[in-house]
Amino acid sequence: MTITIREAAVDSVEAAKLMRRKGANRIELNAHLEVGGLTPDTRTIIDTLIAIDDVPVVVMIRPRPGDYAYSDVELQQMQDSIHQIADVGGQYVTFGVVRDQQLDRQAMADLIDLAASRELEVVMHMAFDKIDVSAQPAAMYWLAEHGVKRILMHGGPLTTPIISALPTIQALVNTAPADLTILPGGGITSENAQYIADSLGVAEVHGSKIV
């Protein structure tokens, strides 16, 4: 399978520029990748959008490290981030809300509707892996029906090598709606990306060392 998209996870403007020079053709912009990525500050978003203007920049919306069951205050912070990203010219956002191993559909619907009203395309990030495996197919279809274009997943805990997690990812790749992309990530590097793409039959891969 020919890889058409190598999405690089970065947490600075300089890292975004370097990854773009090395061949990444989509950027996921975060703060603090060491904790899995948080919402970057507005200045970093603006500077990255200016510096990387020829490929998509997906901006992380995650108000804190830890789990993905957010309080009302944190959900309001996420809504504020959606507005800020749209206000500075962003076009793509990634977020996820999961509570008790289930997709928090009400919280996600509110965030997705707000993003759509601001003309932002939505991706669900690796919070998806925190959903019980038995509930993942229904969650996947719900997300697709609500306009989510892509789901980033590792197929299990990040401590599990992605090669071992491929069967879980494959099950969703095989049944995903035509307008939804399953994006594997977490432990994918420039060395193993092609093997994983071939194994899964996918054309898009994600990682902090993807190029």
Image: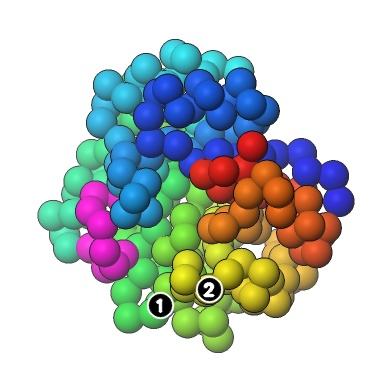
> In the rendered structure, which segment of residues is drawn in magenta?
62-70
Q: Is residue 156 visible?
A: yes
Residue depicted at x 18% and y 54%:
74
Q: Is residue 144 magenta?
A: no
Taking the image as shown, residue 132 lies to the left or right of residue 54, namely left
**Pointer 1: residues within 10 angstroms few (<14), some, or many (20+)?**
some
Residue 151 visible from this viewpoint:
no
Figure colour scheme:
rainbow
Q: Which of 175/46 is in front?
A: 46
Label disc, if present, on residue 160 of the rendered structure: 2
- The image shows residue 145 at horizontal and vertical percentages of 58, 60
Compared to residue 38, the image places residue 161 above or below, namely below
Task: Classify residue 33 as left or right of residue 129.
Answer: left
Q: Which residue is mark 1?
A: 102
Q: Position of residue 200 (x, y in %)?
A: 77, 63
Q: Residue furthest right?
A: 1
Residue at 45% of width from left, 28% of height from top? 15
- Residue 8 image offset from top left, x and y in percent: 55, 39
